[in-house]
């Protein structure tokens, strides 16, 4: 009796399987959309930072540096 009950509990219909797959796919779709939005925001922020004077000043100081970090060794 327990064996029959257990076998009936493990049977999944195609409708139930379809609903589960749709739910999982929609969750992943939401994650992909969030990732795309974040990517475009980061790209815009990076572009804005590249146009500021701070980045240009950093490049200028990096090219002027010719010494050693740890003294005269």
Image (tube, grey):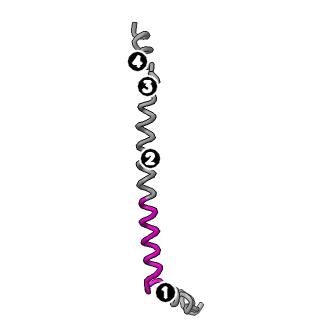
Tell me which corner region of the image, top left, top right, bottom left or bottom right, holds residue 49: bottom left
Query: Which residue does the numbered mark 2 point to in the structure image?
Result: 29
Query: Which residue does the numbered mark 3 point to in the structure image?
Result: 15
The residue sitting at 46% across, 68% down in the picture is 43
The residue sitting at 45% across, 40% down in the picture is 25
Tell me which corner region of the image, top left, top right, bottom left or bottom right, holds residue 72: bottom right
Of marks 3 and 1, the one in the foreground: 3
Residue positioned most to the top: 1
Q: Is residue 26 above or below residue 41?
A: above
**Residue 56: mark:** 1
Q: Where is residue 63 in the image (x, y as percent from the top left)?
A: 56, 89
Q: Position of residue 4 (x, y in %)?
A: 43, 9
SS state under label 3: helix
48 or 64: nearer the eye? 48
Whichever of labels 3 and 2 marks the residue nearer the N terminus, that label is 3
Give the extent of the magenta segment. 37-58
Q: Is the magenta stretch mostly helix, strand or loop?
A: helix
Q: How far apart are marks 3 and 1 (CA)?
A: 60 Å
Q: In this view, does 24 lie above or below 40?
A: above
Q: Distance between the residues labelled 2 and 1?
A: 39 Å
SS state under label 1: helix
Q: Does residue 16 belong to the magenta stretch?
A: no
Q: Distance between the residues labelled 2 and 4?
A: 30 Å
Categorize mark 3 by other alpha carbons within 10 Å: few (<14), some (14-19), many (20+).
few
């Amino acid at each position: 009796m327990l064996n029959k009950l257990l076998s009936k509990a493990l049977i999944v219909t195609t409708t139930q399987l379809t609903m589960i797959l749709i739910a999982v796919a929609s969750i992943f779709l939401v994650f992909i959309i969030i990732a795309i939005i974040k990517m475009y925001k980061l790209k815009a922020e990076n572009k804005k930072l590249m146009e500021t004077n701070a980045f240009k000043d950093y490049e200028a100081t990096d090219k002027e540096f010719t010494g050693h970090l740890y003294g005269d060794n």
